[in-house]
Amino acid sequence: MNFEFSDEQKFIQEQARAFLGDKCTAAQVREVLESDLTHHAGLWQQVIELGWPATAIPEEYGGLGLGYLELCVLAEEIGRSLLPAPVSSSIYLATEAIKLAGTEEQKRAWLPRLAAGEITGTVAFAELDASIHKGQVAVEVAGGKISGCKQPVADATLADFAVVAARDIAADNFSLYLLDLSAEGVTRSGVDSLDPSRPLGKLELKQAPVELLGGAGEGAVTIDRLLNGAAILLAFEQVGGAEAALNMAREYTTGRYAFGRPVASFQAIKHKLADMFVAIELARANAYYGAWALSTESPELPLAAATARVSATEAAWEATKENIQAHGGMGFTWEFDCHLYYRRAQHLALLLGGQRVWKNRLVEQLKPAASNSHTL
Amino acid sequence: MDFNDSKEQAEFRAEVRAWLELNANRRADEVQIMRGQEGGYERAKAWYKKVADAGYACLAWPKEYGGAGLSQIHQVIWSQEVADFDTADGYFVIGIGNCGPAVQAFAPEEVKRDLLPKMASAEHVWCQLFSEPAAGSDVAGLRTRAEFDGDKWLLNGQKIWTSGAQHSDYGVVLTRTDPGVSKYRGLTLFMIDLKQPGVEVKPIKQMDGGRHFNEVFFNDAVVPDAYRLGEVGGGWGGALHVLMNERMAISGVQPNGFAQFLHFCQHTEVDGERVIDDPVVADRLASWYARDAGLRNANWRMLTAIAGGGVPGAEASLGKLVGAVMNQEIANFSVDYYNEAGAIMDDTVNVLEGHFQRSVLFSPGIRLAGGTDEIMRNIIAEQVLGLPQEPRVDKGIPFNEIPTGS
């Protein structure tokens, strides 16, 4: 029994933490947050050179052939440093979608370029009034052409291609499609969002050419597995961000004096920070279990993913909101960095569906076959 | 990262399972239900004698102290396997879990060889005597005096909230040996033979009607100097050792109510609908599942650290805090779900034989025993997060000059 990352994985994590701690400070996050930039191009280039997009891509497709555990430790550091780059959209989602559902030809066409950082991808699942989690999408495909509106789409104005969830009218089924975002019939634009350091956008599609990704009608199955994997990777980002927020609260309240003593010596503050720690430790433990389930493709993956997700969203909320309170009025200013963590926590919590969706996914896994009940 | 046994661990697990199948009964209940405990102590002693005779008691303790000389991981495998069987060793958790490590750390060698094997086999039952009427969360404010008298120590004073003292043969007791120095420096830790005229045990009736805790009175109770655990005046360090092991010991076994709640949700119908299909329930069930899983997975992390030679840190306080709070919330939510019928206490009427009703009344105590929620948060804040202590008015003052309010 060994419920810990290996020394090699920890080394990868330490290297990532050192690199991001040095290069990706709040100043870099703000460069994107306070501008119309799609991402921090300089940092993203360095991330590509470090091979992060290639981490979980098999060697035969130009990747490093490492696994999900390596990606998990990187995700934690990415979350801690609030990296303003298309990590979740391209690495956790678009790349994984092709790995999961792509034909051999599609994998050969896309994965080497994703691994090399020549292109980035995203997924276009959500629509304003339709829940991807029930397969209720209005965007339609007919005769190889797609039409409709997808929003929000993470990194919509940056990505080179999107994996789009749509309904085939003729076949009356729900599938995934590869869409070249530079193709005719695609209009894309940014939308204002809670966390502009990870921008969201909109795709307006009018008869744009698409290519089926995976089997026809297999959209729901692929999305289900894709969301489970991404939920675990995002949970590591959430845990990393939550821990950074707790550290920020700890440093500030230890250094600041009120009533002649450090603010952190008051029990009201200590207990607040203890509660943040508790939420983070539970979330971290569940994220680790998720990492194990993902790396072994365990049958427990759906339950482990939902658990990691519910826990991490709760921890990130607890830590980032209370970090603002621990800073008092300064925590509410634009100048202080508390809101960067708070915004990112919101972004990550909503990206694959909120707590309502994930709590229901969790409970679905706990439902027994309908028998063996007794009446009250 | 893997949950597989090594070859040697798998063999040990199979051996344990085979022994349990022959010597114990599988649990009849799908979940463990809180019931009245008549006759439980005698059954527990008989069971534990069997365990000890087979060589499975205190697997991680050295052989000369009555253990099996194996590792903490063997102990974990034992606990995992025995959980499927209808057995009881709760009466011995405090002795073996809290007192044992302190005796091993601080007692003279010949005393260890004399007393520990009988503790390990539960022939002798032990309890822990720290809290006093005027020293709860501020346990270092205790007043029980130990005075050296020629060749022995004489104890006078009163302890309270002593779990299992009515069954105990020995105890680990924290006393004040010097009231003239600051409070943490005037304490000394001892072992004491409780079956002597100078010791009187009086059970306390709890708010739920049970009698788990006791008052223990010392009236010139005698303790040989060989039973001293550590230096005179060094009792606080020893006490912290015991308390940390206590939280470790109970974090694995203390109820958090989730298994029973899940069973209730899965197998009960109210108004023709399964409880688990109610959206109001789903929200809570998901949150509590995540918390329960978090505790379980945090425990895996702690065990991995221990297996690697690490020492459990103050993180054990987390399990105690989360589990105890959740236990009470679950009991209240479940009783509430029964509507009017929730107020009935009748094993033959209630689902799960009144488990939740009993738990509503017992759960407040779990939040207090072993340190209150507030003390757990202080420990996390100070020992894990390194936050500064609250300024204290008793700091550096001789114990007998500290204001007492009385």
Image (cartoon, rainbow, N blue to C red):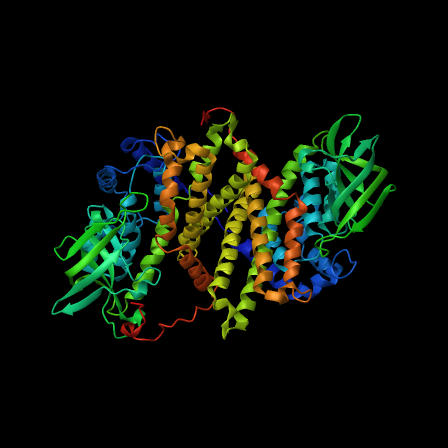
In the image, A222 versus B154, the foreground residue is B154
Query: From the viewer's perspective, is residue B331 above or below residue A7?
Result: above
Left or right of A371, for residue A91: right
Q: Residue at x 74, y 60 (%)?
A: A32
Q: Residue at x 53, y 37 (%)?
A: B281
Query: Which image quarter: residue B142?
Result: bottom left
Residue B10 percent location from the top left of the image: 39, 39
Query: Which image quarter: residue B234?
Result: bottom left
Left or right of B350, for residue A349: right
Residue B225 percent location from the top left of the image: 17, 65
Question: In the rendered view of the protein, which quadrant contains the C terminus of chain B?
Answer: bottom left
Residue A178 percent location from the top left of the image: 77, 39
Q: How many marks?
A: 0
Task: Please identify the residue farthest to the right as the structure is shown.
Answer: A184
Query: From the viewer's perspective, is residue A83 above or below residue B21?
Result: below
Q: Residue at x 18, y 59 (%)?
A: B218
